[in-house]
């Protein structure tokens, strides 16, 4: 998959996530997205919100870091809904770290959205 295809896939995933969790849509945040690949170095992407603005950059100014194995990311980005992302996180396929207050805020907003949707 080319860098352009990956960028488009990341943008698609961020937009879908924003559609499902409108409270996060206007959050001003920089994410560091690491897509783990088998046997090679993992590409690191800088995702700036709102937007999204996506670039292949180490994202030194990121407040949240998300790590996902590439095959899982591809599946989640193409077909995943909010519940699928949460399930992947709970199973350990998606790892989130960073500033504790920001991670907690995003987690709380997602939990409230799931409760509203009745899919908790």
Image (spheres, rainbow, N blue to C red):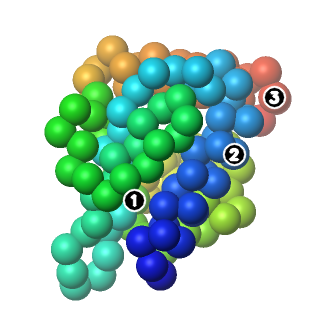
Asked if 75 appears above or below 22 in the picture, the reply is below
Residue 87 in percent (x, y) is at 58, 50
Viewer can see residue 72? no
- Number of the front mark, 2 or 1: 2
Secondary structure at badge 3 equals helix
Asked if 75 appears above or below 68 in the picture, the reply is below
**Residue occupying image coordinates x 57% and y 52%:** 11
Residue 62 in percent (x, y) is at 27, 34
Residue 41 is tagged as none
Which picture quadrant has residue 98? top left
Q: CA distance from mark 1 to mark 3?
A: 25 Å
Residue 68 is tagged as 1
Asked if 77 appears above or below 17 in the picture, the reply is below
Q: Earlier in the sequence, mark 2 or mark 1?
A: 2
**Residue occupying image coordinates x 29% and y 81%:** 38
Viewer can see residue 2? yes
Residue identified by numbered label 2: 16
Residue 117 is tagged as 3
Name the image quarter holding the C terminus. Answer: top right
Tags 1 and 3 touching, CB below 8 Å = no
Number of marks drawn: 3
């Amino acid at each position: 998959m080319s860098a352009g295809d990956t960028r488009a896939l990341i943008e698609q995933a961020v937009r879908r996530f924003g559609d499902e969790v409108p409270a996060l849509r206007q959050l001003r945040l920089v994410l560091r997205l690491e897509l783990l690949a088998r046997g090679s170095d993992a590409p690191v992407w800088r995702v700036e919100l709102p937007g999204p603005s996506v670039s292949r950059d180490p994202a030194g100014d990121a407040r949240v870091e998300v790590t996902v194995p590439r095959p899982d990311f591809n599946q989640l980005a193409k077909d995943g809904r909010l519940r699928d992302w949460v399930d992947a996180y709970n199973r350990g396929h998606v790892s989130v770290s960073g500033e504790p207050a920001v991670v907690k805020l995003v987690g709380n907003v997602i939990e409230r959205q799931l409760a509203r949707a009745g899919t908790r």
